[in-house]
Amino acid sequence: MTLFEITEEQILNRIRFENPWWKDGKIDDFYDSMKRRLYFSKLFPLINNSKIKRAVVLMGPRRVGKTVMIFHAIQKLIKNGVDPKKIFYLSIETPIFNGIGIEELFNFCRKAVNKEDDLKGFYVFFDEVQYLKNWEVHLKSLVDSYHHVKFIVSGSAAAALKLKSNESGAGRFTDFTLPPLTFHEYIHLKGLEYLIEAKEIKWQGALRKVSGTNDIAILNEHFLNYINFGGYPEVSLSTEIQANPGRYIKSDIIDKVLLRDLPSLYGIQDVQELNSLFTTIAFNSGNEFSYDKLSASSGVSKNTIKKYISYLEAAFLIRVVNRIDLSGKSFKRAHFFKIYLTNPSLRSALFSPIDGSSKAMGNMVETAIFSQWFHRYWHTPYYAGWKANKGGEVDIVGLDRNGLKPAWAVEIKWTNRFHKQLSELKSLFNFLAKNNLSEAIVTTVDVTDIIQVKDIDFHFMPSSLYCYTIGERTFEID
């Protein structure tokens, strides 16, 4: 049998195919027609800044729009006057590039456009770079060797990307994490900004910007849609995909991470164990867990479960939220903790979409709101839980800048009941009194109000508006 070898001309032709702007100065219409994510305005300055000799490492979970954002960056570079033939894009997972180093690929690109003697002003994008062995070593070498070239790489296996970026890229790489859609971004992509009104509340002695709405019923419909389908741009905008989210999200996002990315990165032998653990967590997102209970229910050792949870966190599928006690003190050993999906639509894909009256709605509202806080990588929220004095729990607690005592508290509810029955919020009352806090937020379905009881201001706010406000504020201060 004759084995055919890939020729240099075939490689060059594939490179030309992946860079259509070399011919007409335009990216593919498929990408051009897509609306930019708001986070594009944060990423592009890092790409455009050629004075700083650092590569940009764009990381994030699958299907959040990294490749689309790269093509939007290429489009803007061309619009800004960059020679289209000095912008190279290559997807490392393309089979024909298998086994070819990124410096050799860079040289192939220069050969494809007859710029082999030119070493200045290039922008080079390597997509899905995690499939290249020792990518970080090669990238560092490129940054050191080509001082007038801007290198940008992206990858979905964020665990490995971040680890290797930190190890090898000190002073050479700038990391940028693209998260799933916030509710704020979802509203932007859908062109629904007309539903939002700017308002202010007095919070902690100052006027704070919050979001209001001119139609809470319509906004809540979109909030439910966000919970079911809103984590990924393509799913959010396609009713066809929403008709069968399991086929798209589960097979193309979850399964590839659980069955391919994580096992290959960490040498996991029993992928069924990992899959079973994630399924349990997804179905119970927002519940309190312990390693003992997870081990007993699954038959997997506690040490293995700890590893799996750290892997799932590194892959941006889940986040662990640690508990503090009634006094706001953290526990030396985290025997109990909550786990949330990083975006609620993962649950819908694994099981089925929910409606506003579903038993799971409370947990999914809590998951949606926590997922907005997870975008703030500089701030870790907690929940409070205690057994003394008949026990109690508060959903979200923020500590002061020193991390020593509670600074604010939020109770997440998908009901209006507590607006009329404040006395039922005993845990919240106890926590506020214990920590000398004079105000708190309580979310509702559609009620907005401020009620003062015992010198404590309770700000009632619809969950959808609180979710939107956190996403908007995060984007503004990121």
Image (cartoon, rainbow, N blue to C red):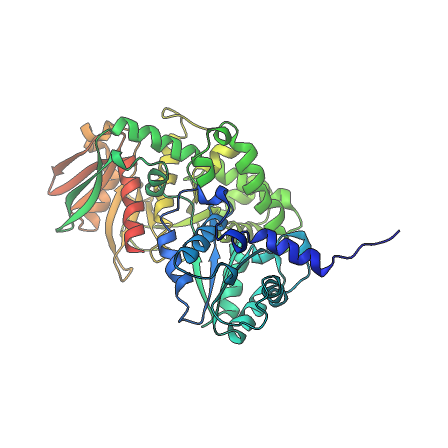
Q: Is any part of residue 47 visible from this angle? A: yes
User: As drawn, is 106 to the left or to the right of 239?
Assistant: right
Residue 39 image position (x, y, % from top left) = 37, 51
Q: Is any part of residue 124 visible from this angle? A: no
Work out which residue is located at the far top of the displayed protein and give it.
Answer: 357
Answer above or below: position of 359 versus 318.
above
Q: Residue at x 89, y 51 (%)?
A: 1
Q: 276 and 386: which one is in front?
A: 276
Residue 413 image position (x, y, % from top left) = 30, 34
Residue 126 image position (x, y, % from top left) = 55, 59
Q: Residue at x 37, y 24 (%)?
A: 357
Which quadrant would the C terminus be assigned to in this image? bottom left
Residue 460 image position (x, y, % from top left) = 20, 36
Q: Residue at x 43, y 57 (%)?
A: 78
User: As drawn, is 184 to the left or to the right of 174?
Assistant: left
Work out which residue is located at the far right of the displayed protein and give it.
Answer: 1
User: As drawn, is 319 to the left or to the right of 137?
Assistant: left
Q: 143 and 146: which one is in front?
A: 146
Q: 424 and 62: which one is in front?
A: 62
Answer above or below: position of 95 versus 276.
below
Q: 303 and 164: which one is in front?
A: 164
